[in-house]
Amino acid sequence: MVLRWYEENRRDLPWRNTTDPYLIWISEIILQQTRVAQGLEYFLRFTARFPTIRSLAEAEEDEVMKYWQGLGYYSRARNLHVAARDLMDRFGGSFPRSYEDVRSLKGIGVYTAAAICSFAWRLPYAVVDGNVYRVLSRVFGVETPIDTHEGQKYFAELASSLLDRGRPDLYNQAIMDFGAVQCVPKSPNCLFCPLRDKCVAYREGRIEQLPVKAGKTVVKPRYFNYLHIHCGEKCLLSRRSAKDIWQNLYEFPLIETEQDMEWEELVKEKRFIDLFQHSPDFKLCKQYPVFKHVLSHRIIFARFYEIELPEFTPVFSSYLEISSSDLESYAVSRLMAWYLEKLNKEI
């Protein structure tokens, strides 16, 4: 029934019309974190610049991150880059056809490996993503939490038992699309669902309760104070190097505090005093209201301050001094991008 539904309702997407494992890989990594409507634009832009494994492997990381900018989960872009270089070193620039070898590449988990192997070579591996979890949990009335080892094992076995081994590529695409279009998370149109008569959740009125998750992620607040420091046509940037959010992306000098602070409190912070100890003539040009930026595990409350200096003193030598007009060439977080867009509109 799902295959019949797919024949009538399939979405025409560029990665559906290819068996190139590289393009399938890129599409799957992008779609792990964004909806198709948004991901399509990024896929086309990314693959236009990096059309082959070699082109991605030979690129500088900064450029890869710039083309990924706006998608979030930047570790996935770094993993793509590392894996592309690994493909060049170990497999001569081609994708291996073995599931185990595909799994050995950095950033490629069970789901992505199954997608690549089934879509590119029609190997019998069942894909289990969020859409598939939802369809299977509802149709079979499974209450085992999907975010537990037990749940992941159970659903993997269930999905494998249902797989059409003669057409694994079509079946996987069909059930994923079915979850994305028909069996949606909220208020699915069950009256027109071809699986309605087989669906335990529909029969028992538990559509909204399935799938089950064991626990919610604890979201913690963080407070960022960005200092947009400029001197004439120059401004300062730093590159995040710690194992933290937005690793290797660029940003303005940052002072992170334990709580939200107004300007009058921030200037009394030791880190602020140390930074401007030799620049008493700094001028606060503008301050912006708090930006609230929600991530999967964090909520960032950010303040941006535009500060003008007559000169950059040696205290700032650890920062990158660039022309303000070159800011758009650097890969930044979505939060930084929002600020820069706002700034450009004001100019």
Image (cartoon, grey):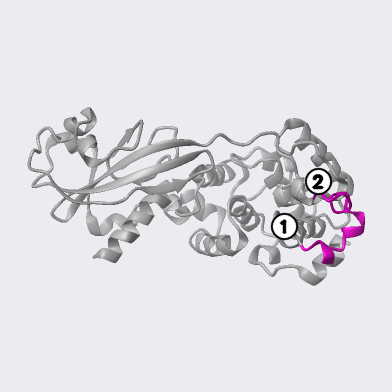
Q: Residue 150, position in %: x, y?
A: 78, 31
Q: Is residue 336 left or right of residue 139?
A: left
Q: Which residue is mark 2?
A: 137
Mark carried by residue 58: none
Helix, strand or loop at mark 1: loop
Tag 1: amino acid: Val
Q: Which residue is mark 1?
A: 184
The quadrant in which the C terminus is found is bottom left
Q: Is residue 332 visible?
A: no
Q: Nearer the viewer, residue 310 or 80?
A: 310
Above or below, 6 against 337 in this view is below
Main secondary structure of the magenta stretch: helix
Q: Badge 1: few (under 14), some or many (20 or more) residues near its Cα, within 10 Å?
A: some
Q: Is residue 84 left or right of residue 230?
A: right
Above or below, 318 against 237 in this view is above
Q: Residue 222, position in %: x, y?
A: 41, 36
Q: Residue at x 29, y 55 (%)?
A: 327
The quadrant in which the N terminus is found is bottom right
Q: Is residue 135 visible?
A: yes
Tag 2: amino acid: Ser
Q: Residue at x 80, y 54 (%)?
A: 122
Q: Residue at x 18, y 37 (%)?
A: 316
Q: Is residue 113 left or right of residue 220?
A: right
Q: Residue at x 88, y 53 (%)?
A: 199
Q: Is residue 255 left or right of residue 196?
A: left
Q: Badge 2: few (under 14), some or many (20 or more) residues near its Cα, within 10 Å?
A: many
Magenta range: 189-206
Q: Residue 283, position in %: x, y?
A: 12, 47
Q: Nearer the viewer, residue 253 or 319?
A: 253
Residues at marks 2 and 1, CA–CA distance in whole angstroms? 13 Å
Helix, strand or loop at mark 2: helix
